[in-house]
């Protein structure tokens, strides 16, 4: 028997387990809380209040995992939870697509530096190490880590979720290592590099949370999986041309401050998100109210958040020279455009969400006793 | 089909059971290897109910506690049978290969 406590007539263990169940959405608790409490307590017979009992961590973890699966619904989930699930899965897909394109562009520039795409860059040759040395091996591994982003996206697009998760986690670990090993004071490091890390962290977390075992797995055609890789190659070409033009002995200082803020990863993400938002607005206008899916605007709005933080961190409000001041103005304009887009996307997405009380397609409903 | 889902369906073959009854039966069926946490159990039940492999049967209140019983549906029985046949075929293939290995003196 479990001991009884307080005014509620509940045992301490029951009170604590019900507190754990608050992790679950209210609608789910309405349907399942008493049943789950009953099942849990039946497996905990003989526990007394005097023992100060608590649900085990494994039980709490199972409820937390259930909460994620319910809130980011998959097959058979209530329409509103399914819409949030689709939103988070889209955040993972779009975010990893951007990281894949960026990974290809980075790989291209590093291969170029190592002399594999044209003459080797003198700065790279100095620290590359001799062939067969540990230093050279380390650089080869660094090159391989650039492929983790593209690998994660391609695996996800082709429906290989486990491979995608493994590649994405390795890529994240590699990026965290880069930030942690940067020889810079902590405040400078957090200000300059950590916000960019957030742009990777958000889609990776979305991948881990959204693609649970109940989530539907879409298998896209091979050409769709290759789109960000091709975009990454084009991006590499474009950035190479722009970089060589900007490093020319004589450059127009009135023009380049307007371009450079768009060439950094956060600037590129900003451009991609603004273009995607405009494309979504055009499509939503043609589709009409009934044809709008909430997942697209909400996913774009979620992706805007880490980009905003990354760009805000790069702001230099104390700039005095006209060059830096122009760049600051451009970044402020980018931030403003993202905020406007983000608000419009959130409003449109929330309006298109199914009502909270819409029933699940395959939910648990007790049979009618009369039938 | 995941292993917990397989055992939950198997636990419901002979009679409808409630949450704790299913968890206890799964533990027995798997010789104590699979111990379903309550959150995991209800996640599995949600999925099986969405796929119409199990359905709620009845509710009882015992000592002030709600017990909701679940039963195996016909499509659940068919899905379980197909999975059992698949697993048996896999086990047979492995056993045959192992027998051949032992007969060849490679062990």
Image (cartoon, coloured by chain):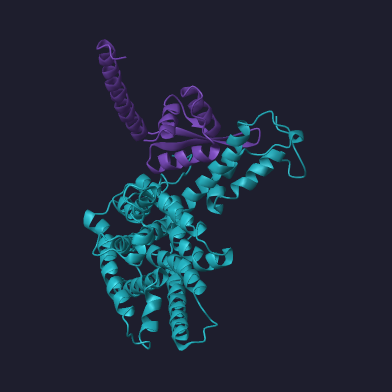
Relative image position of residue A355 (x, y in whole percent): 46, 61
Can you tell which quarter of the image residue A147 is in?
A: bottom left
Q: Quadrant of the N terminus of chain B?
A: top left
Q: Quadrant of the C terminus of chain B?
A: top left
Residue A360 visible to an observer of this rendering: no
Relative image position of residue A145 (x, y in whole percent): 37, 53
Check the image and report above or below for B3 versus A170.
above
Q: Foreground residue, B17 or B8? A: B8
Relative image position of residue A158 (x, y in whole percent): 28, 50
Q: Foreground residue, A207 or A16? A: A207
Q: Foreground residue, A306 or A76? A: A306
Check the image and report above or below for A24 versus A272.
above
Q: Chain A appears in which tint?
A: cyan
Which chain does purple denote in the image? Answer: B
Check the image and report above or below for A161 versus B28.
below
Residue drawn at x 26%, y 10% is B103
Q: Foreground residue, A281 or A255? A: A255
**Count of all numbered marks drawn on residues in the image:** 0
Residue A48 visible to an observer of this rendering: yes
Check the image and report above or below for A362 versus B15.
below
Residue drawn at x 43%, y 78% is A334
Relative image position of residue A204 (x, y in whole percent): 43, 55
Can you tell which quarter of the image residue A34 is in?
A: top right
């Amino acid at each position: 028997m479990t001991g009884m406590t307080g005014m509620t007539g509940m045992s301490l263990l029951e009170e604590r387990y019900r507190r754990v169940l608050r992790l679950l959405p209210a609608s789910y608790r309405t349907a399942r809380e008493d049943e789950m409490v009953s099942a849990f307590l039946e497996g905990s017979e003989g526990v007394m209040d005097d023992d100060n009992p608590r649900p085990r961590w494994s039980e709490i973890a199972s409820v937390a995992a259930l909460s994620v699966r319910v809130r980011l619904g998959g097959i058979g989930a209530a329409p509103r939870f399914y819409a949030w699930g689709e939103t988070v899965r889209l955040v993972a897909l779009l975010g990893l697509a951007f990281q894949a394109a960026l990974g290809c562009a980075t790989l291209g520039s590093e291969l170029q530096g190592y002399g594999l795409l044209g003459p080797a860059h003198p700065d790279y040759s100095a620290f590359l190490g001799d062939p067969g040395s540990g230093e050279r091996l380390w650089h080869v591994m660094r090159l391989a880590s650039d492929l983790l982003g593209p690998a994660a996206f391609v695996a996800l697009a082709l429906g290989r979720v486990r491979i995608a998760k493994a590649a994405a986690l390795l890529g994240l670990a590699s990026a965290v290592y880069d930030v942690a090993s940067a020889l810079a004071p902590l405040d400078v490091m957090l200000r300059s590099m950590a916000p960019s890390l957030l742009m990777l962290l958000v889609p990776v977390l979305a991948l881990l949370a959204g693609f649970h075992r109940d989530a539907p797995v879409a298998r896209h055609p091979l050409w769709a999986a290759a789109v960000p890789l091709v975009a990454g190659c084009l991006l590499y070409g474009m950035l190479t041309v722009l970089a060589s033009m900007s490093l020319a002995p004589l450059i127009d200082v009135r023009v380049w401050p307007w371009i450079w803020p768009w060439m950094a990863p956060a600037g590129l993400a900003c451009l991609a998100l603004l273009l995607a938002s405009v494309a979504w607005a055009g499509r939503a206008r043609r589709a009409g109210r009934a044809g709008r899916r909430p997942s697209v605007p909400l996913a774009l709005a979620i992706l805007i958040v880490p980009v905003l933080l990354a760009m805000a961190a790069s702001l230099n409000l104390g700039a005095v020279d006209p060059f830096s001041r122009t760049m600051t103005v451009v970044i402020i304009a980018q931030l403003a455009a993202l905020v406007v887009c983000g608000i419009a996307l959130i409003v449109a997405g929330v309006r298109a969400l199914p009502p909270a009380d819409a029933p699940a397609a395959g939910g648990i409903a007790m049979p009618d006793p009369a039938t | 089909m995941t292993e917990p889902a397989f055992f939950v369906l198997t636990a419901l073959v002979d009679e409808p059971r409630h949450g704790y009854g299913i968890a206890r039966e799964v533990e027995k069926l798997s010789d104590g290897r699979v111990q379903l946490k309550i959150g995991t159990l209800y996640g599995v039940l949600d999925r099986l109910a969405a796929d119409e492999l199990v359905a709620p049967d009845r509710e009882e209140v015992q000592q002030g506690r709600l017990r909701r019983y679940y039963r195996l549906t016909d499509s659940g029985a068919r899905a379980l049978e197909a999975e059992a046949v698949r697993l048996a075929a896999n086990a047979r293939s492995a056993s045959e290969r192992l027998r051949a290995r032992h007969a060849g003196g490679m062990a």
